[in-house]
Structure formats: C-alpha cells, structure tokens
Image: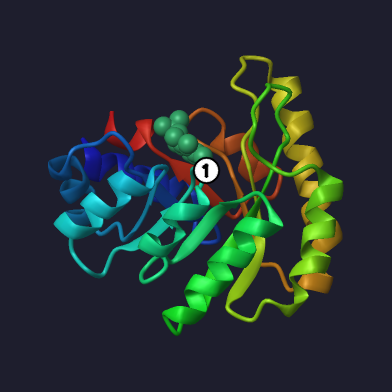
Amino acid sequence: MIAENISGLKQEIGQNVQLIVVSKYRTIEEITKAYAAGQRMFAENRVQALLERKEALPDDIVWHLIGHLQSNKVKYIAPFISCIQSIDSFELLTLVNQQAAKNGRTIDCLLQVHIAVEETKFGLSETECEALIAQAKGLLNVKIKGLMGMASNTENQEQVKKEFLSLQTLYSKLKEENNFDTLSMGMSGDYQLAIAFGSNMVRVGSKVFS
Ligand SMILES: *Cc1c(COP(=O)(O)O)cnc(C)c1O
C-alpha cells in the first residue's frame, strides 16, 4: 500500500532526511495515491515523462530531475523545476543558468558525482566537481546546494559503504565553504546505509510503490 509505505518510510528516516519519491515508470493513478498520502516531492529521470506528469498532476508538487539532462531540453523544465540533481558538466550548468534567468528564477542544483565502480557515462569525478564549483561562481541564477550520487548496484555492502564514504567525505570537505545543505544519496535498496553515511535526502521509488 502506497500510503503505508510512505508513512513507514518517513517514520524510519526521521525529520532530518528528506524523502523524494521517484515516480518514474509509475502511472498517474499510483502517483496520485502518493500525493493523497501527503507526499509533495517527486522525482523523474526523463524530461518528456516529467512534462507529462507535471501537466496531469497538482500544481503544488515539487519536482526534481534525477536523470541525465540533454542541453536542448533545459528550456522545457526551466519554468518550473525545483531542483536538478543531475548536473554533470559546466556547459549544462551554464545553460540551466541562462534558462533560469530567462524565467526570472533561480534553480537549485546538485552536482552528480560518479562514485560507483560501474561504467556509466554520467557523473563528475571529485576533481571535476571541485573545478566546476570554482567555475560556477559567476552564475547567479543557479544555486548549487550539494551533491548527488548513486552507489553500485551490488549485494556487496562493503563496496557500497566505500562509495557512500567517498561521497560523504567530499561533501564534508566542500560543505562549509560553499554553503551546501544537501547530500542526496540512497535509493530503495540502500537508503538506510546512505543515511548512516550522512545522507539527508533519499530518492526512493520501488519501495514506495510495491
Ligand atoms: C530510479 C532511481 C532511483 C530510485 O530507485 P529505486 O531503487 O526504485 O528506489 C533513485 N535515484 C535515481 C538517480 C534513479 O534513477
């Protein structure tokens, strides 16, 4: 039951951790049930699906984007997106800044850091992350609020711990100087471990909708 899943999760993670419900691949009916249970923060990983859902669902939903964002699609989400968690290049951040300015907004962003051993095209290395922060100082219509990362999809807890620790360490290093307040880490399979490593925002899909 979706409502029970959400209230159980909220109780478990406590008030200091934000719950982002990942609604990707779910029906409008399912998402509406989560909304009726009081959930207001949702995340999608594809722009097209995000636009369709935003259109179909209530206006007070706070939308996050968690998937790779193509530069030609920034303009479609800039009018309303609350937080883009998947910033993985300075070029993308510059475009988001431009489109945010066009809409008279400041858009919250997280830098996606590549912590998993798995091969993926997306996410910054630690060095790239620090370089991007330095480059971004002049961008007035984006606010980098922190970091996002995804651990390897593995049963090997030691590996996952190692990856969460590396992101926690980077976050601690950058937090004060950059006024960060968000470490987005943890999904259905690993959110408890992520919280143990300092996460204050979890992105949970399957565990909510199962
Ligand atoms: C799909 C997805 C999630 C949620 O995954 P679940 O295992 O369903 O909780 C979280 N973060 C990102 C970036 C995702 O793509």
Image spot of residue 136 (x, y percent)? 74, 69
- Helix, strand or loop at label 1? It is loop
Side (left or right) of 119 relative to 175:
left
Quadrant location of residue 207? top left
Side (left or right) of 189 relative to 155:
left
Quadrant location of residue 82? bottom left
Image spot of residue 179 (x, y percent)? 73, 73
Image spot of residue 56 (x, y percent)? 15, 55
Side (left or right) of 182 relative to 42:
right
Image spot of residue 5 (x, y percent)? 31, 39
Quadrant location of the C terminus in the rendered image: top left
Side (left or right) of 31 relative to 176:
left
Of the pair 170 and 118, the residue shown nearer to us: 118
Quadrant location of the N terminus in the rendered image: top left
Of the pair 126 and 92, the residue shown nearer to us: 92
Q: Which residue is situated farthest in the front direction here?
A: 72
Is the residue at mark 1 in contact range of ligand 1, meaning its CB lies under 8 Å from it?
no
Q: Residue at x 68, y 52 (%)?
A: 89
Q: Residue at x 69, y 21 (%)?
A: 157
